Amino acid sequence: MSPLRPRPSAPRTPVVPDAVRAAARYWTTGVAVLTARDGDEVFAKTVSSFTTLSLDPPLISVAVAAHSPLAAAVRADGRYAVSVLAADQQGVGRRFATPGAGRALGMFTTVPMHTEATGAPVLDHCLAWFDCRLKAVLPGGDHALLIGEVLAADGRPGEPLLYHDGQYRQLTAQHAMTSTGAHA
């Protein structure tokens, strides 16, 4: 006897974006800020669709709205950085999640940043950062998937800022689990 039973046949309806958005709310992610520079302009946007892609060569991927000024800046300049936010950086996450708040001439005055290997802006006080040269831009529906070769990276111990069910969250000691070391 098979442990899997087929669902009763029902007419299939197309999945609508609202259903995908509702289901995705329950996928817990870290929170990061994608930054780039194009000439004298600096761009920043809070993202949750970021992941390490490969260690050899060192690659990361991050998704951003395909037609955003930030995506255009990354394409034009060929460099970007991803700064992983610490639990105490909710204000930074909110600021750069606000439409229009992530574009300025020169460096942002309210959020301290610095540069590393590529010259892309890296947020100060973040938990980790990845400084990248753009390797590829892949289509992803209404988003562009930016694949970057990591030229420099660093991290520090601390608690990450998380996003779950439409809210910022933090890890707590009572919910911490030990790892067996198995990763895909």
Image (cartoon, rainbow, N blue to C red):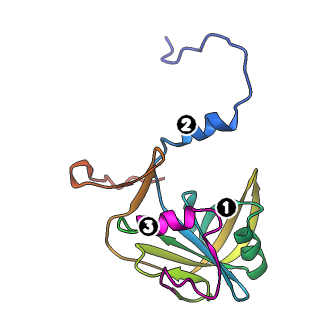
Decide: few, some or many residues near mark 3? Use Cα within 10 Å; few <14, some 14-19, many ≥20: few
State which mark lies toward you, 2 or 3.
Answer: 3
Q: Residue at x 68, y 13 (%)?
A: 10
| Residue 105: quadrant of the picture | bottom right
Q: Are marks 1 and 3 in contact (CB under 8 Å)?
A: no
Element carrying mark 2:
helix
**Image location (x, y in percent) of residue 36:** 65, 78
> What residue does disc 2 label?
23
Name the residue at the left extreme.
Answer: 174
Residue 162, above or below 119: above
Q: Is residue 132 left or right of residue 142?
A: left
Amino acid type at circle 2 is: Ala
> What residue does disc 3 label?
91
In magenta segment, residue 140: no
Regarding residue 93, the answer to whether it shows in the image is: yes
The answer for how far apart the CA atoms under marks 2 and 3 are is 26 Å
> What residue does disc 1 label?
64
Q: Residue at x 70, y 33 (%)?
A: 16
Decide: few, some or many residues near mark 2? Use Cα within 10 Å; few <14, some 14-19, many ≥20: few
In magenta segment, residue 100: yes
Regarding residue 56, the answer to whether it shows in the image is: no
Magenta span of residues: 90-113
Element carrying mark 3:
helix
Q: Earlier in the sequence, mark 2 or mark 3?
A: 2
Q: How many labels sit on residues?
A: 3
Is 62 or 105 nearer to us in this picture?
A: 105
The answer for how far apart the CA atoms under marks 2 and 1 are is 19 Å
